[in-house]
């Protein structure tokens, strides 16, 4: 099973790579597999270092809200 968290594009480079922010973690990913252009501020889903789809902001923010609730619940269960 693959779990993909929406990531916000922070910076785009000429070589079709980008820096994205995934819940506070920044990483460099490839944009080569995307069928449509992306801009800084767009949200994408990533699989093994490649952005594979672009999301609309509303759906991305709703997904992130759910992920944050899951993390909070897991932290409460573990006593952190």
Image (spheres, grey):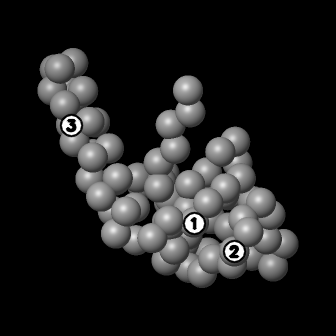
Report the disc number at residue 36.
2
Tell me which label, 3 or 2, sits earlier in the chain: 2
Circle 2/circle 1 CB separation < 8 Å: yes
Of marks 3 and 2, the one in the foreground: 2
Quadrant holding the C terminus: top left
Q: Does 33 appear above or below 15?
A: above
> In this orientation, does residue 77 appear?
yes
**Lower position in the chain sequence, tag 1 or tag 3:** 1
Looking at the image, residue 41 lies above or below residue 31 = below
Q: Give the quadrant of the N terminus.
A: top right
Residue 26 in view here: no
Residue receiving disc 1: 54
Neighbour tally class for label 1: few under 14, some 14-19, many 20 plus, Cα within 10 Å: many
Residue occupying the point 61% across, 60% down: 53
Q: Which residue is mark 3?
A: 72
As helix, strand or loop, the secondary structure at mark 3 comes to helix
- Along the line of sight, which residue is nearer the eye, 51 or 77? 51
């Amino acid at each position: 099973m693959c779990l993909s968290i929406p990531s916000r594009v922070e910076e785009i480079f000429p070589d079709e790579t980008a820096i994205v922010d995934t819940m506070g973690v920044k990483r460099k990913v490839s944009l080569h597999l995307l069928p449509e252009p992306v801009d800084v501020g767009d949200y994408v889903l990533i699989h093994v270092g490649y952005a594979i789809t672009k999301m609309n902001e509303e759906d991305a923010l709703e997904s992130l809200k759910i992920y944050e609730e899951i993390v909070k619940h897991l932290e409460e269960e573990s006593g952190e």
